[in-house]
Image: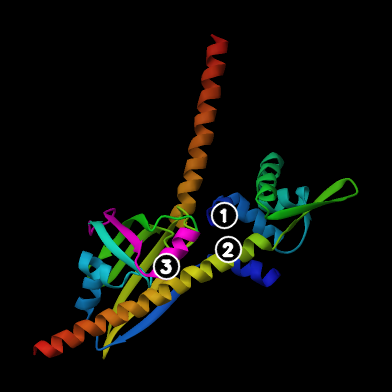
Amino acid sequence: MHADVFQTLADPTRRRIVEALLGGEQAVNDLVERVAIHQSGVSRHLRILHDAGFVEVRPDGAKRLYSLRAAPFQELDEWVTRYRELWEARLDRLGEALERRQKARKERN
Amino acid sequence: MAEGLQASTGAKQRIKLERHYKKASVADVWELLTTKEGIEEWWGPDGFSVTVHELDLRVGGALNYAMSATAAPQIEFMRNAGMPVTTEHRGNFTEVEPKTRLAFSFPVDFVPGQAAYPIETTVEIFPAADGVRLIVTLDPMHDAHWNDMMVQGWEMELGRLERSLEKRLAQGS
């Protein structure tokens, strides 16, 4: 699942779409204008984002309005937090290893 | 919600960790970061042991290691998660400046949720008056990876374009 989250956001156009949606829900036409690529491209990326759970859509008359869902972004945050914790612990162990070396050197002298 | 989204998508998920190792020497830090024995001593995580199989300290060189659960709770955890007790990890050095700067690109290597997604990590070493200051930058969305994928996307598009041109030429003749 983590890989999916990253893979989905790996595409720069999809990231631009997501950034454009940060301000709130939007119709495809508005997104086409903001992201500056052809409508078929925006529609294709919206479908991928929708399938991956990043966006949801609701009808508004003849228009379809797209907006972001929080879940995958929360997952991304949790994932990054766990990765950070892994490295925090790793750097603590590096500090312990350094201390062992200093101590061993002192004992030798 | 908007704030959380901003944090996730705005700019990049770059994380800076900083440590000040008092009385430590730059030489020791470099050795622990770049030798088989050094890395095996601290890479971890807790309850796991690391065996470095290949270490080629130059840009593009391999850093391959096996990570094995050794403590009972970790072994049980891996088994319950349906994962092997030992996992192989393959990375590459992307920057090597002796005793100053080291960068490597690695697949995600924490447990659980192994995913073959490379993460760029940069380690900067600064001598301090009473030891060593270390800055580690974790960059899960490093530009190189985004660019790679973008290039791949383009190559696919161009390949398609070429094929359709060939088809047209064939039809025209």
Identified by mark 1, the residue type is: Met
Residue A26 relative to residue B62: left or right: right
Asked whether B108 falls inside the magenta stretch, the response is: no
Identified by mark 2, the residue type is: Leu
What percent of the width, then of the height, locates residue A78? 57, 68
Same chain under badges 2 and 1? The reply is yes
Looking at the rendered structure, the secondary structure element under dot 3 is helix
Q: Mark 3 sits on what residue?
A: B74
Looking at the rendered structure, the secondary structure element under dot 1 is loop
Residue extent of the magenta highlight: B56-80
Q: Mark 2 sits on what residue?
A: A76
| Residue at 29% across, 69% down | B101
Between disc 2 and disc 1, the foreground one is 1
Q: Nearer the viewer, residue B35 or B101?
A: B35
Residue A16 relative to residue B156: left or right: right
Please tell me whether residue A47 is drawn above or below residue B71 in the rendered image. Answer: above
* Disc 2/disc 1 C-alpha distance (Å): 10 Å
Q: Earlier in the sequence, mark 2 or mark 1?
A: 1
> What subunit carries mark 1?
A
> What subunit carries mark 3?
B
| Residue at 65% across, 46% down | A48
